[in-house]
Amino acid sequence: MSKSMFRDSAMQNMCGMLPAASLTHLELSTNMLGIVDPKFVAAVLQELTCLRRLGLADNHLKDKGAVLLGRDVLPRLSVLSDLDLAGNSVGDEGAVCLARCG
């Protein structure tokens, strides 16, 4: 689902259809998720506890999104082994938060 340019309503509809109990790979790169309410995105992602790979590159997440990921999402994804956050302009605050959860 990369490069789908998901925004608020499309993201909500798509997330409502995800098979949370069995989904192991999710590629959402280049979808402008940083423009969608980051709390909503975090709430959806933290329910996907079987994820092993999560691609979020080029989504304008910045520090705010990285902090939410590090604080609210990643601690619940215990089997996640591959996380792609390239191109999200994550600064020091976000990087520190992400590092603390790992």
Image (cartoon, rainbow, N blue to C red):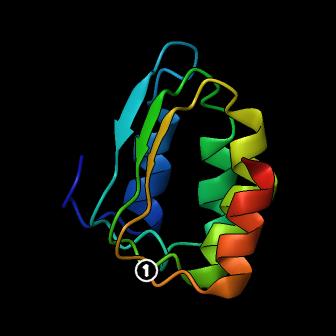
Q: Which residue is mark 1?
A: 60
The answer to which quarter of the image holds residue 33 is bottom left
Q: In this orientation, which residue lies closer to the viewer: 84 or 56?
A: 84
Q: Relative to 93, is 98 above or below? A: above
Secondary element type, mark 1: loop
Q: Residue at image x 38%, y 29%? A: 25
- Residue 60 is situated, as x and y percent measured from the top left of the image, at 43, 80
- Residue 44 is situated, as x and y percent measured from the top left of the image, at 62, 45
The answer to which quarter of the image holds residue 6 is bottom left
* Residue neighbourhood size for the residue with mark 1, other residues' Cα within 10 Å, grouped as few (<14), some (14–19), many (≥20): many
- Residue 98 is situated, as x and y percent measured from the top left of the image, at 69, 61
Q: Is residue 36 left or right of residue 86?
A: right
* Count of numbered marks: 1
The answer to which quarter of the image holds residue 85 is bottom left
Q: Relative to 49, is 55 above or below? A: below
Q: Residue at image x 65%, y 59%? A: 40
- Residue 87 is situated, as x and y percent measured from the top left of the image, at 35, 76
Q: Residue at image x 44%, y 42%? A: 54
Residue at the outermost top position: 22
Q: Residue at image x 50%, y 13%? A: 22
The residue type indicated by label 1 comes to His
Q: Relative to 47, is 100 above or below? A: below
Q: In this orientation, which residue lies closer to the viewer: 42 or 97?
A: 97
Residue at the outermost left position: 3
Q: Relative to 88, is 99 above or below? A: above
